[in-house]
Amino acid sequence: MLAVFDKSVAKSPEALQSPQSGSVSTLKDGFLANHFGSLHPGSVSVNLASSGLIAYSLQNKNPLLPRLFAVVDDIFCLFQGHIENVAQLKQQYGLNKTANEVVIIIEAYRTLRDRGPYPADQVVRDIHGKFAFILYDSSSKTAFIATDADVSVPFFWGTDSEGHLVLSDEAEIVKKGCGKSFAPFPKGCFFTSSGGLRSYEHPLNEVKPVPRVDSSGQVCGVTFTVDEESKRETVGMPRVGSAANWSSNY
């Protein structure tokens, strides 16, 4: 799977950008989407206009960690993996028996966006299993991205030459667009357009970048770890206003 978000939708962490990274413009002339398509004939690419793109292939997928895609009410979601507590989450979000993992993620996000009773870190923490997902809400032009606490599904992110955020389950695809400005997506974390990168396992702590060094001794992106010494300010989510204002409040 692949997603490229314009920096106006999802601003890459500055620490992810490596000097002399060799990155390119991934959205220009459909560069990275075309590369993805050449590696995965028959793949589907969804143009998100000025916000970026999403692409996926249902071929050669791991049967234990299936890849799913769905669009519900202008919410696009790519999901890979397996949720163990599906029945519990269906009941929690009032979904019918036919709802699958990707529909559960969309409904969880929609509940969060529409001033639900759960903070974002709890929404992700309540999902038990092996997973990675990329969600884009075209109504508010916001992204919501997360992976499980053990990074059971390979998941990588990076920043291209124009500061756009690139995400994929294939490291080589991210490297193709981002050069050395890439890294594994940090375990136990989620990313939102307004809140940036946060830990859902340790929601009261900041996350800090730690430089990665490749075999040649060159800095190659960063990894992010929980900073046990640093505490985040507690900010409540007001349950007023329109659903479209979710991104400005969290």
Image (cartoon, helix red, strand yellow):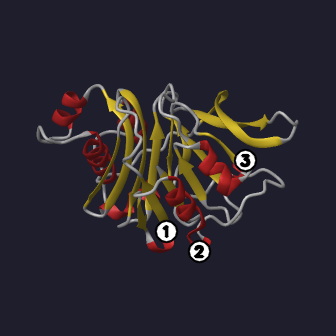
Of the numbered discs in the image, which one, if any, rests on residue 39? none
Q: Earlier in the sequence, mark 2 or mark 3?
A: 3
State the image quarter where residue 114 is shown.
bottom left
SS at mark 3 in the image: helix
Is 16 on the left or on the right of 105, as rendered? right
Residue plotted at (32% across, 39% down)? 118
Q: For mark 3, does the 10 Å Cα neighbourhood hold few (<14), some (14 to 19), or many (20 or more) residues?
A: some
Check disc 3 and give the amino acid type. Answer: Ala
Residue plotted at (50% across, 56% down)? 3
Residue positioned most to the left: 96
Q: Earlier in the sequence, mark 2 or mark 1?
A: 2
Residue plotted at (83% across, 53% down)? 19
Residue for badge 3: 15
Q: Label 2 vs label 1: CA separation?
A: 15 Å
Check disc 2 and give the amino acid type. Answer: Asp
Q: Position of residue 205 (x, y in %)?
A: 58, 32
SS at mark 1 in the image: helix
Q: For mark 2, does the 10 Å Cα neighbourhood hold few (<14), some (14 to 19), or many (20 or more) residues?
A: few
Residue positioned most to the right: 217
Is 204 on the left or on the right of 132, as rendered? right
Residue for badge 2: 29
Q: Label 3 vs label 1: CA separation?
A: 22 Å
User: In this rendering, does residue 193 appear at all?
Assistant: no
Q: Position of residue 119 (x, y in %)?
A: 38, 40
Of the numbered discs in the image, which one, if any, rests on residue 51? 1
| Near-viewer residue (6 or 201) | 6
User: In this rendering, does residue 233 appear at all?
Assistant: yes
